[in-house]
């Protein structure tokens, strides 16, 4: 009788597990900021898959543990022995092989997702069409850009990070800015450089991230698909004013993007305001101040357009 | 415990022995070569650093309760999280586990002491000076190291003060000293476990705790020189003007990242494996069942040590890492889930149809397993490299690894301390206060570390002193949790101090557990065993009536 009861309970619980896993997997899309690049959609899909699988395993083990804790407690002074079973080859083989298959599934699926993303990064072996590797020397994008006769050729934007400011240069129009404007639905190519320490390019809505290594030039590519205003953050700890190293990112319609570039090109270059420099000049009141030495904020970028 | 009388006939408590322990308190401040004294020295020293580092964490959480930077200035904030991590890792987790292992390994394998008692004392006595050196950097005009516990160059070598004596130098020296101390300890543990096992204690009769200490210390031996060497090179860059990692002078900052993680990933298993070992001792004892699949758990321990040594690049997925490396290391990283899965399933199966006793150590062990499951699942998510590109360097990572280092490893440590408290001190702890400690810790830990998961998903970057207002809700929850976690330690301290001084005398084997350490008096006599026991049976022989009451020479 107890056996039957337990079987029924198990069946019900497995059903609950499946429903809960699928439901949480669906919910997972809403736990992250809106996806604003095509890569973001891929990553959200992967995350939803991981949450579904993870929930199923978590609830499975928790169910077993919880059931045992509730039903198997001995009276406090009863230190008599449980059962002598030391293991079972069948069960142990099962719980070795199943995780192997699961992790292969997860890795394989992640690999598929990664193939669908087109983000370049330090080097590329998946055969996406990127700018040639530009390690060490000056970037050779000017040579490759015209060869792409595509009408909507991807704009190339140079990104420079320094303690603690972002600067963007649009070489085609010779425009510099501390705001990053991107045309929507176009494959964007960024050329990332750092003038001092490690930094990281991260816009949460874009989902992807790339560290910027001083002394190297790193390509970074993605396709924004949603018009809006976002916040670029430095994702790699870069010292005292790290938390202030932000820049506004605008994904514009092609029309607005062109207009912005044209207007910016007419503006004379001027030093941009900078949060780190401002706070360094006049630090806000704190309960405890160490007054330890800090690296001074680098000279603010001189740009055509600043926010 | 009605059966106390039975075993006390076996070998009655030696009242003079435990009396002598307390009267000789000064031994703990000397260069003592007894592994039990050294074990306690390690544990108490590490716990003091744990309290200091925990206090720093509460200041950090105090800063993060509001979006603005308003409690401490930014250099101090950066110093605090750098020192919090460095202390917790190098001066709490590593030495506390070494301390517990020091006390237990000779007892559990039937040895009179460690293989090299002098080296053992030397390893310990390098720890307090290194810790004090590190902490003293708070008094320097240049302040402490502020580049995070990774100390990635070129940030870590910037030295804005221009002083020769700066926090980063102190950090490097301290980590190098602690590295040397740990390498010496590793030599000692590996030799002890290979050479000093009692007759009959073949590898497949060793308790899982011994397997896990063995695997963990092998990792220390093989990989720690990489970090120690890397940090020495960093020190040369910082203070002697070399250019190993300086990109503007032909050096490569990526080289440091690889040297750092080449050790610092395996080291996660140096901490985690002994924690798993503790679970594997506590859970069978309070389930009254043998550890399910003992051999596969033992092999999984070694397998995990192996896999952990070929996954370090997953810390660098978003760094200057080529695509082939991203893909290769994604596959190896996910493999780590297999041996860890085997362990979690084995503990679950051990509990299944057992006779459970929800004592304080058991609560900590089961609580630790549950939270490890969560930490492990978020770890598998992070191994899925495309997803990692989103949450890398966000609070998702911080949440994930605190579920491992606090909610799993530190809980295991507490569980182990309660479990072996009677053996170490010869006194029983107070069960009621132990349970209060558990529930405060369990609730506090989840309140503190769970909010970091949604924060990371939403894109809150780690190591920021100020943040956008949309992140405030979860930060307030985490901060309140952290303050609760701070309070949760008080009943533990009170319990340990009062029980050690006034607790009821502990019998040899209060839990009716198997294992050689339970066959001898509590606390153990000076040379542990009058006569080296012979082991004839595998460990965890629960499930057979009264094996624990049999003669000490029959069974491991």
Image: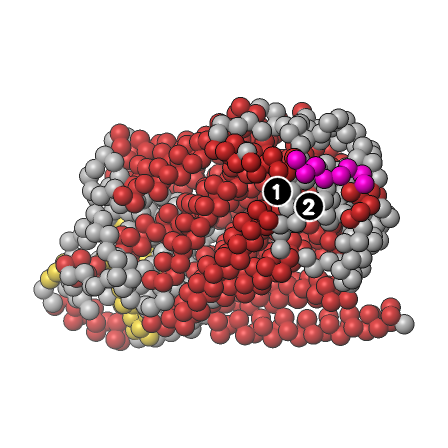
Image coords of residue B212 (percent x, y): 64, 40
- Chain of the residue under label 1: B
Dot 2 crowding, Cα within 10 Å, few <14, some 14–19, many 20+: many
Q: Using the rendered image of the protein, determine whether residue B75 is visible from the camera's viewpoint.
A: yes
Give the residue at x 53% y 23%.
B118
Callouts 2 and 1 close, C-beta under 8 Å: yes
Dot 1: element? helix
Give the residue at x 48% y 38%.
B263
Q: CA gap, disc 2 to disc 1?
A: 8 Å
Q: Which residues are magenta?
A: B9-16
Image coords of residue B277 (percent x, y): 65, 45
| Magenta stretch: includes residue B14 | yes
| Magenta stretch: includes residue A228 | no
> What residue sits right under mark 1 in the picture?
B425
Dot 1 crowding, Cα within 10 Å, few <14, some 14–19, many 20+: many
Image coords of residue B423 (percent x, y): 66, 42
Tell me: residue A226, above or below residue B210.
below
Residue B170 location, quadrant: top left
């Amino acid at each position: 009788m107890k056996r039957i009861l337990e079987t029924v309970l198990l069946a019900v619980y497995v059903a609950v597990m499946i429903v809960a896993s699928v439901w949480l997997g669906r919910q997972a899309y809403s736990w992250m900021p809106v996806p604003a690049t095509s890569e973001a959609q891929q990553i959200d899909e992967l995350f939803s898959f991981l949450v579904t699988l993870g929930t199923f395993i978590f609830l499975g083990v928790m169910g077993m543990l919880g059931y045992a804790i509730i039903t198997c407690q001995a009276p406090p002074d009863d230190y008599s022995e449980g059962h002598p079973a030391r293991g079972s080859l069948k069960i142990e083989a099962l719980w070795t092989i199943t995780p192997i298959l699961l992790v292969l599934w997860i890795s394989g699926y992640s690999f598929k997702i990664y193939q669908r993303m087109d983000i370049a990064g330090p080097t590329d072996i998946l055969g996406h069409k990127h700018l040639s590797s530009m390690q060490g020397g000056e970037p050779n994008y000017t040579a490759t850009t015209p060869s792409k006769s595509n009408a909507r050729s991807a704009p190339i934007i140079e990104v420079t990070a320094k303690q603690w400011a972002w600067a963007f240069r649009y070489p085609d129009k010779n425009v510099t800015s501390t705001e990053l404007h991107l045309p929507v639905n176009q494959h964007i190519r960024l050329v990332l450089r750092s003038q001092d320490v490690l930094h990281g390019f991260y816009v949460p809505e874009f989902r992807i991230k790339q560290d910027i290594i001083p002394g190297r030039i790193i390509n970074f590519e993605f396709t924004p698909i949603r018009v809006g205003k976002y916040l670029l953050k430095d994702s790699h700890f870069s010292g005292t004013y790290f938390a202030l190293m932000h820049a506004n990112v605008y994904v514009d319609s092609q029309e607005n993007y062109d207009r912005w570039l044209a207007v910016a090109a007419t503006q004379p270059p001027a030093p941009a305001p900078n949060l780190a420099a401002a706070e360094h000049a006049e630090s806000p009141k704190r309960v405890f101040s160490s007054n330890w030495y800090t690296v001074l904020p680098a000279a603010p970028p001189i740009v055509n357009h600043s926010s | 415990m009605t059966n106390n009388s039975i075993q006390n006939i076996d070998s009655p408590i030696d009242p003079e022995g435990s009396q002598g322990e307390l009267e000789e308190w000064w031994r703990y401040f000397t260069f003592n070569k007894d592994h039990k004294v050294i074990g306690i020295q390690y544990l108490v020293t590490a716990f003091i650093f744990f309290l200091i580092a925990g206090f720093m964490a509460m200041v950090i959480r105090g800063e993060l309760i509001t979006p603005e930077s308003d409690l401490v200035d930014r250099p101090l904030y950066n110093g605090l999280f750098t020192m919090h991590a460095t202390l917790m890792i190098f001066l709490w987790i590593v030495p506390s586990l070494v301390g517990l292992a020091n006390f237990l390994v000779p007892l559990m394998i039937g040895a009179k002491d460690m293989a090299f008692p002098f080296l053992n004392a030397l390893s310990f006595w390098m720890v307090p000076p290194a810790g004090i050196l590190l902490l003293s950097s708070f008094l320097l005009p240049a302040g402490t190291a502020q580049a995070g516990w990774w100390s990635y160059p070129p940030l870590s070598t910037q030295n804005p003060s221009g002083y020769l004596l700066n926090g980063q130098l102190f950090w490097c020296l301290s980590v190098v000293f602690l590295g040397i101390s740990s390498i010496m300890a590793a030599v000692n543990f590996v030799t002890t476990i290979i050479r000093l096992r009692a007759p009959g204690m073949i590898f497949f009769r060793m308790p899982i705790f011994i397997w896990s200490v063995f695997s963990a210390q092998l990792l220390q031996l093989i990989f720690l020189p990489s970090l120690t060497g890397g940090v020495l090179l960093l020190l040369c860059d910082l203070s002697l003007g070399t250019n190993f990692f300086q990109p503007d002078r032909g050096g490569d900052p990526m080289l440091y990242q690889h040297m750092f993680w080449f050790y610092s990933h395996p080291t996660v298993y140096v901490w985690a494996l002994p924690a798993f070992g503790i679970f594997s001792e506590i859970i069978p004892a309070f389930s009254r069942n043998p550890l399910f699949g003992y051999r596969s758990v033992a092999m999984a321990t070694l397998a995990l040590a192996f896999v952990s040594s070929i996954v370090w690049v997953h810390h660098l997925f978003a760094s200057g890492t080529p695509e082939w490396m991203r893909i290769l290391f994604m596959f190896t990283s996910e493999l780590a889930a297999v041996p860890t899965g085997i362990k979690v399933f084995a503990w679950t199966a051990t509990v299944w149809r057992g006779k459970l006793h929800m004592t304080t150590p058991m609560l900590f062990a089961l609580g630790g397993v549950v939270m490890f499951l969560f930490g492990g699942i978020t770890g598998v998510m992070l191994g899925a490299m495309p997803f990692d590109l989103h949450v890398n360097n966000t609070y998702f990572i911080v949440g994930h690894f605190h579920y491992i280092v606090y909610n799993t490893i530190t809980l295991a440590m507490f569980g182990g301390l309660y479990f072996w408290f009677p053996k170490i001190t010869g006194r029983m702890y107070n069960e009621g206060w132990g349970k209060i400690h558990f529930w405060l810790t369990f609730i506090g830990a989840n309140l503190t570390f769970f909010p970091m998961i949604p924060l990371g998903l939403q894109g809150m970057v780690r190591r920021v002193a100020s943040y956008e207002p949309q992140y405030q809700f979860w930060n307030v929850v985490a901060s309140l949790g952290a303050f609760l976690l701070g309070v949760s330690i008080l009943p533990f301290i009170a319990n340990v101090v009062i029980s050690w001084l006034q607790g009821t005398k502990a019998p040899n084997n209060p839990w009716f557990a198997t294992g050689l350490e339970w066959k001898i008096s509590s606390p153990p006599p000076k040379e542990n065993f009058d006569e080296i026991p012979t082991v004839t049976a595998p460990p965890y022989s629960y499930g057979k009536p009264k094996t624990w009451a049999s003669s000490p020479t029959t069974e491991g």
